Amino acid sequence: MGLTRQDIVQMAVLLSGCLLVVLNYTLLAPALPVIMREMSVSETEVQWLTSVYAMVEAIVIPMNAFLLGRISVRKLFAGSFVLFAAASLMAAVAPSF
């Protein structure tokens, strides 16, 4: 039995979501010196950025597991993706640290 078009689309959406999260975290490390220079902050302050990201991720993952039993996977994924995109956009346009 082969994969249907719907199976392929679902897999592509899930994989793109996973890729975006990993890519966001991976791209943060090389950007730290630029963030330090552009926002005039110390290494310690910038290291908090990675720590806070990891803490938020550690809170959201179990929370999503809890929510899976209460709302559909589609709604949870879409909501999580929208929140992730909004937070990334706010971080990108932030005028200060």
Image (cartoon, rainbow, N blue to C red):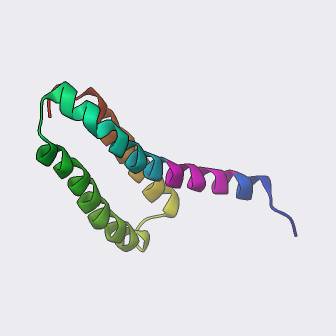
- Predominant SS along the magenta part: helix
Does residue 34 lie above or below 59 as drawn?
above
The residue lying toward the viewer, choosing from 67 and 91, is 91
Classify residue 65 by image quadrant.
bottom left
Query: How many callouts does the rendering have?
Result: 0
Judge whether residue 80 is colored magenta.
no
Q: Position of residue 19 (x, y in %)?
A: 52, 51
Question: Residue visible at 46% across and 53% down?
Answer: 22
Rendering quarter of residue 4: bottom right
- What stretch of residues is rendered in magenta? 9-19
Residue at the image position 28 percent from the left and 59 percent from the top:
54
The C terminus, quarter of image: top left
In the figure, is residue 4 to the left or right of 35? right
**Nearest the eye: 20 or 72:** 20
Residue 12 lies, in percent from the top left, at 65, 51
Q: Residue at x 42, y 74 (%)?
A: 69
Image x and y of residue 41, in percent: 12, 35
Q: Is residue 25 above or below residue 59?
A: above
The image quadrant where one finds the N terminus is: bottom right
Instruction: Confirm whether residue 7 shows in the render.
Output: yes
- Where residue 32 appears, as percent x and y from the top left, is 27, 39
- Which residue occupies 18% across, 44% down? 46
Residue 46 sits above or below residue 8 on the image:
above
Magenta highlight on residue 13: yes
Q: Is residue 86 visible?
A: no
